[in-house]
Amino acid sequence: MSFFVSGVILSGYKKKLHCAAKLKTKMIMKRILFICVFVSISLLSCFSLPELRFNADRKFKIVQFTDVHYVPGNDKSGVALRTIVETVEAEHPDLVIFSGDVVTGKPAEQGWKIILDELERRSVPFCVVPGNHDDEQDLSREQISALVKQYKMNVNARKDPKIKGVLNTVVEVKGTKGERASFLLYCLDSNAYPADSRFKGYGWFAADQIEWYKRMSEKYTRKNGNAPLPALAFFHIPLPEYREAYDKKENKRFGERKERECSPELNSGMFASMIEAGDVMGVFVGHDHDNDYIVNAYGIALGYGRFTGGKTTYTNMENGARVIELTEGERMFRTYIRLQSGEIKDMAVFPSDF
């Protein structure tokens, strides 16, 4: 009997030892996982941003893709992906900018990876600003921001400034020589919809975003001997000034307007701040799929990209992209639309052609 009891006790003791060992192993594995995640995040934060610089010919080329509206698993998205790949291979851009509504289907993470992997494997630097539809899937704006920044070729600031929205950033383009910024690219979250129920339609720039832009502009102006650095701005939703500028008969324009501009009802003053700062010479947006024009508004070019997506959403235009070429030391740019077919249209030089 005593042997039987001892055996039971010993068996129970062995089980306890086994359970304890399993628990200890799980705890160790959790610690290892935590360390791996911590190291990964630390390494990500230490990644230096890809350096952007004018080339030996003093040129810098940007390709703007807008309203890709990629839906994972939808065959109609294939043309959008082909347009991105073929445009990059034809134009060899120094930077790609996605101006919102990039992935508009679930699973959104898969869609983002399919698109951004194409640029990563080609070592093409890229910047992303969100549209009003990007966070309507299964990723929040903050999750999209974190996902985008995992890529080594992404040039968005690794830490979002503490203002409304995500992926707000100012990108420096350095000169052919030296380490000082020669040109600036403001890439901004134009938000989605009004939080104030008195307004319909689409969102506008918040006061803290405008103040942040003004601080950045003032900082770079001081560093440049109190002369504003030439700059462009990219975001998703067109400013209210777009409609007014296009409607003025005396303003010269290139491209097409096939739908009414879907600007916010409230004008929060971003355009006025750009006029006062004196650095931004061109603004490029998306949002309105059937507009691709560019027009002069008081010395600032207000332009659209070219709708890049497929038939996963509305469009009455052949898809494509906008190309913008900068010249170091000159307050001007050359721009045109490249269609998916390869056709080039609406070539213009700002400001001389306007």
Image: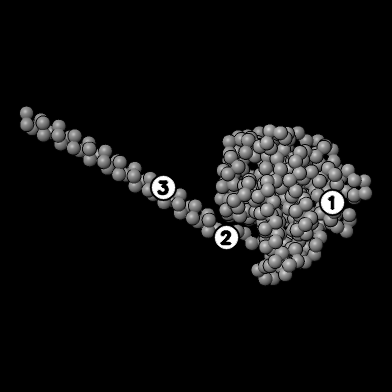
Q: How far apart are marks 2 and 3 (CA)?
A: 25 Å
The residue tagged 3 is 33
- Could you tell me which residue is drawn at 68 percent across and 36 percent down? 196
Say left or right for 117 vs 90.
left
Q: Where is residue 70 in the image (x, y as percent from the top left)?
A: 67, 38
Determine the image quadrant of residue 72.
top right
Residue type marked 3: Leu
> Which structural element holds mark 2?
loop
Q: Residue at x 32, y 44 (%)?
A: 25
**What is the crowding at mark 2: few (fewer than 14 residues within 10 Å), some, or many (at least 20)?**
few
Residue 136's image quarter? top right
Residue 277 visible in the shown view: yes
For this view, does 133 lie left or right of residue 47? right
Above or below, 40 against 308 in this view is: below
The label number, if any, that marks residue 48 in the structure image = 2
Q: In this view, does 106 lie to the left or right of 28?
A: right
Q: Regarding mark 3 in the picture, which secondary structure is present there?
A: helix
- Circles 1, 3 touching at the beta carbon (< 8 Å): no
Q: Which amino acid does label 2 sit on?
A: Ser
